[in-house]
Image: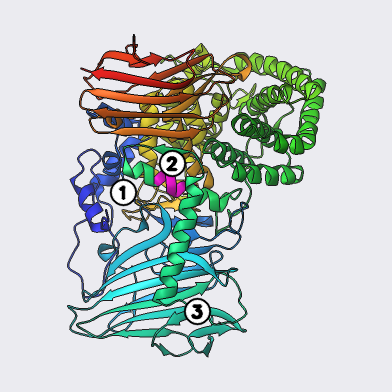
Amino acid sequence: MRATIPALLAVLLAATLSGAGAAAPAAVAEGSCPPPGATAAYAHKVRAALYARHDVLGRRLLAKPGGPSYDRVRDVLAPLFYAAGGGGRKLTESGAYYLPFAYPFNVNGARLFALHVADGSEIVARRVGGPSVTVYVGPNGKERYGSCLRRLDTATLANGYLPILDTSYTDVTGVKYQQESFVGRAFGTISLSYVHIHVDATSATRDTQVRLVPTPGTLAHQGNQLLSHGSTRLVWSGDAEVDHSAVTFDIPAGTEGDVYYGIPSRSTDGRPLQVGEQAYDAARTVVGNFWQKRLDAGTTFDVPDEQVGNAEQALLVQELLLTWRYSAGNSYEELSYAEAADVARVMAEYGQDDVAQTILRFALKRLPQRYTNWRAGSLLVAHADLYRLSRNRTFLNRETPRLAQLVQAIGRQVDESKTGLLPPEAYSSDIARSVYALHGQATVWQGLVSLGRVWSITGHPQLAARSRKVAARLRHGLLHAITRSARRLHDGSVFVPAALLDGQRPFPNLALSRQGTYWNLVMPYALASGLLPAHGRIAHGMLRYLLGHGGRLLGLVRAGAGRLYGQYPPRPTSGIDQVYGVNVARFLADADQPDQLDLSLYGMLGAAMTPNTFVAGESASVTPLHGRLYRTMYQPPNGGANAAFLENLRLLLVHETRGPADAPRGLELAFATPRAWLTDGQTIEVDRAPTSFGPVSFTLTRDGSTISGTLVLPRSPRPATVRLRLRLPSGQHLRAVRVNGRPVRAGRAGTIDLSRRTGHVTLRAVVG
């Protein structure tokens, strides 16, 4: 359902939870339309939440009947709309974010992106600052499409998730425009942005125009094309007035009209391109079928929340386009090793093995140029995960010589160490100070034990033995250093510095200092590694510290976000950085924190991504920036942030437990689903989810007071434990449960033990 931006403002004004709202619009002259501003009440509520150590906004949502939901979260903060790059400079001319569209030719992802700006005003070829075409409308063709946010509807995607952008805009005279755009192929090899604008001037008293302005420079006019040095820059269909620097379409008052045009993503040979209605419709059908087929080839998580399902599919499309790229169309279009390894692991979990292989092959090839032990460990973990989930021995064997080199290099360093630790390395890519980095070294340990186990079952006994030996010594050194560095605080929480043995003191509020921010970003790598048992004393204390010392906001990872706020930031300078939520989610699942996982899922959907188009940046503002109501992202889109949502969703439905030395042990199914997903009439379905034990499928359907389920559980290797949880709405309980026709007892939390069962299993539960 399309929601207008003014409608979203109305929701914000009505929200008593956070005091969100826009200043009442003042009377303005025709054509003047200032962007919505944040009210003092909204700014005050946001600042109070940021100064708090606990996630006060998230706690309020968890306390509501039914818990968090998309609608409830989006009532709390204003929507994301603006995009910024280095120095806080806007990425596009209008400041609105863009969607990177492409039609990839193989599993390496896209090489040529077209940046479709979400307010419908512009399409930029390849990357920010590249050749573009801007749309102007109105009686004189001088009003930039989308320039008045109060008259712009929220952008949407076709079918809710396909990479086909829909926008609607009303100009100052009341003429309505609907625009749709996507990237397809022309002549089989040319990436072409197809655009259709429908103009409804039936109520207009004056003729209106649609004016297309390419930049830069004056272009040659040939037929229905504008060319630069013989290459097509703009092609259109139908009658238009051309003056070498603009193409103008006239729509008479009292009528409707359609404008079709195209913008190549790269140089062409000047051959005439077809972009009229017939060509447009044909290309749109091909593009829709292409992406749907690609999505259907992977794992399916079908949940009773349309917004969650649309986000899942849209983010998978983004990941298929980005592959190893951290972002697209800006200076972040590069390989970021630890984050790329996380994306590869998530894509393997969604059955997209070919994409995971592409990412890992590229990252491993590039690693020697920018080697760190942390990056090496991340790639060891990801290769082990890919084999566990895909059983692709051919790919593993092909990569093993280079992986063995990494293990040998790590082993030499550990052998030479007097403490059992790896040598100090840079804290992170942004902090050059050399430290004994717990996050990096824990990741290396995880990679050694995980890949060592994989090698032991794939015919590499010597490599397996070497990995185990190095891992054992590193673990001993790490646990000793953690014991020496940890501090138990008066509130019962435990602080362990990311820089071991460095004397770092606890942070009262993590996100209000640069060092605290980076602890909050990197520590989840250690927490998710399995080095510290999730239910153990230290890990439990660290979870309390994370939750009680400013680590989260609406279930999202907090950060300073200084790059967004510039030289003179408002106080507090705090935002969110959900890229690193992927490992928070893994730890929360290990620690069995279903409510926090639910909060994170809806926090991402309602506060860390753009409404209906599901674009996220590396970080995002929370405190109003420059007095504007709508919030700003840094260098969107972001593959790591996408992976965080996808991982969180999977963990609600399928979670693997681990035994000693990080060994896969069992399965927890539907352990953290939002309670609303098992209300009357709802169905949860998982189809072909890869696990260490083989694919898992299950369906849970509620009809009245009865929940019916079918499960297909793996046979070999058989997990030691399999448990299913039925999380019911508050106040409801399981009265009786039958598995394969026989009564079984359910635990207090609705947990049903299915251990020792394999193959096809049926379930029937009665709710009271």
**Amino acid type of the residue that numbered disc 2 sits on in the rendered structure:** Ile
Circle 1: element type: loop
- Colour theme: rainbow
The answer to whether 262 appears left or right of 205 in the picture is right
Q: Toward the viewer: 105 or 222?
A: 105
Q: Is label 3 or label 2 in front?
A: 3
Circle 2: element type: strand
Cα separation, mark 1 vs mark 3, equals 36 Å
- The reply to whether the C-beta atoms of the residues labelled 2 and 1 are less than 8 Å apart is no
**Amino acid type of the residue that numbered disc 1 sits on in the rendered structure:** Ala
Q: Toward the viewer: 737 or 674?
A: 737
Residue 315 part of the magenta segment: yes
> In the rendered structure, which segment of residues is drawn in magenta?
311-316
The answer to whether 394 appears left or right of 173 in the picture is right
Mark 2 is surrounded, within 10 Å at the Cα level, by few (under 14), some (14 to 19) or many (20 or more) other residues, namely many
Query: Picture coordinates of residue 204 (x, y %)?
Result: 19, 80
> On the image, numbered disc 2 is attached to which residue?
576
> On the image, numbered disc 1 is attached to which residue?
78
Against 284, residue 743 (above or below) is above
Q: Earlier in the sequence, mark 1 or mark 3?
A: 1
Q: Toward the viewer: 550 or 304?
A: 304
The numbered mark at residue 234 is 3
Q: Earlier in the sequence, mark 2 or mark 1?
A: 1
**Amino acid type of the residue that numbered disc 3 sits on in the rendered structure:** Leu
